[in-house]
Amino acid sequence: MRTARSRDRYRRPLKNSMLALFTASCALAVTSCSGASDTPKASPTPSATQPTKPADPTEAAKKDSIATYQSYWKEMEKLYADPSGKGAKLKQFAASAALKNAESDAKRAHGRGLLLMGQVTVQDPKVTKVVTHGKLAYAVISSCLDISKWKTVKADTKKPVTLPSNRLTKYVIQSTVERWPEGWRVTRDEPQDQRC
């Protein structure tokens, strides 16, 4: 017959074995559960993803020509406001007749002691024609040019000059923007003598 002491001797190893088994089971369960959620899923390799569509040349031409045209007018503001003309980088955005006309008109205004100060707003520019093939890509842009905040002032006093009250300060303008080797350039700017 076993004594209480001998029974304890057999129960302790059994208790210890069960405790070790339970701990190992818990550790295994936690490891397997946490391993599934903590490990980030592998992202697909670039070769496994869908190939990106090449940009539509017509849409790219529209976007680039409008951006060039808006930058052109920002540089025009600088050109007319500075008698030296050195602050403007108009040649980065204009060429041909547009560049020649802008530079000569600004020089004429400065020669009469006048500056144009303020802001020009190009409203609602729309590409009405775009050609991306052939020798020279180009776009024709129609927009509403708002020069109501572009004030003519005397260069020495900065006092406003009185201008005819019936002059157009918001009018439709049609412009041609061409893609040159150096980038897009405004080559023609033609006011349409039409309010907008």
Image (cartoon, rainbow, N blue to C red):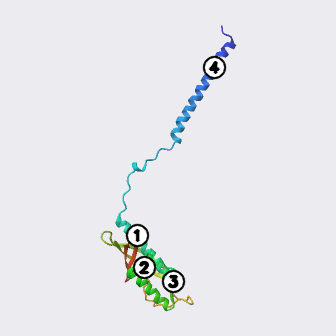
Q: CA distance from mark 1 to mark 3?
A: 26 Å
Q: In the depicted view, which residue is nearer to us: 24 or 100?
A: 100
- Sequence-first disc among 1 and 2: 1
Q: Amino acid at mark 4?
A: Pro
Q: Secondary structure at mark 4?
A: helix
Tell me if mark 2 has few (under 14), some (14-19) or many (20+) residues whose alpha carbon lies within 10 angstroms of its own: many
Q: Quadrant of the C terminus?
A: bottom left
Which residue is label 2 attached to?
Answer: 145
Q: CA distance from mark 3 to mark 4?
A: 97 Å
Direction right: furthest residue: 5
Direction top: furthest residue: 1
Q: Secondary structure at mark 3?
A: helix
Tell me if mark 3 has few (under 14), some (14-19) or many (20+) residues whose alpha carbon lies within 10 angstroms of its own: many
Which residue is label 1 attached to?
Answer: 64
Q: Quadrant of the N terminus?
A: top right
Q: Position of residue 2 (x, y in %)?
A: 66, 9
Q: Tell me the tag on residue 155.
A: none
Q: Amino acid at mark 1?
A: Asp
Which residue is label 3 attached to?
Answer: 81
- Sequence-first disc among 3 and 4: 4
Q: In the depicted view, which residue is nearer to us: 127 or 149?
A: 127
Tell me the mark number nearer the camera, choosing from 4 and 2: 4
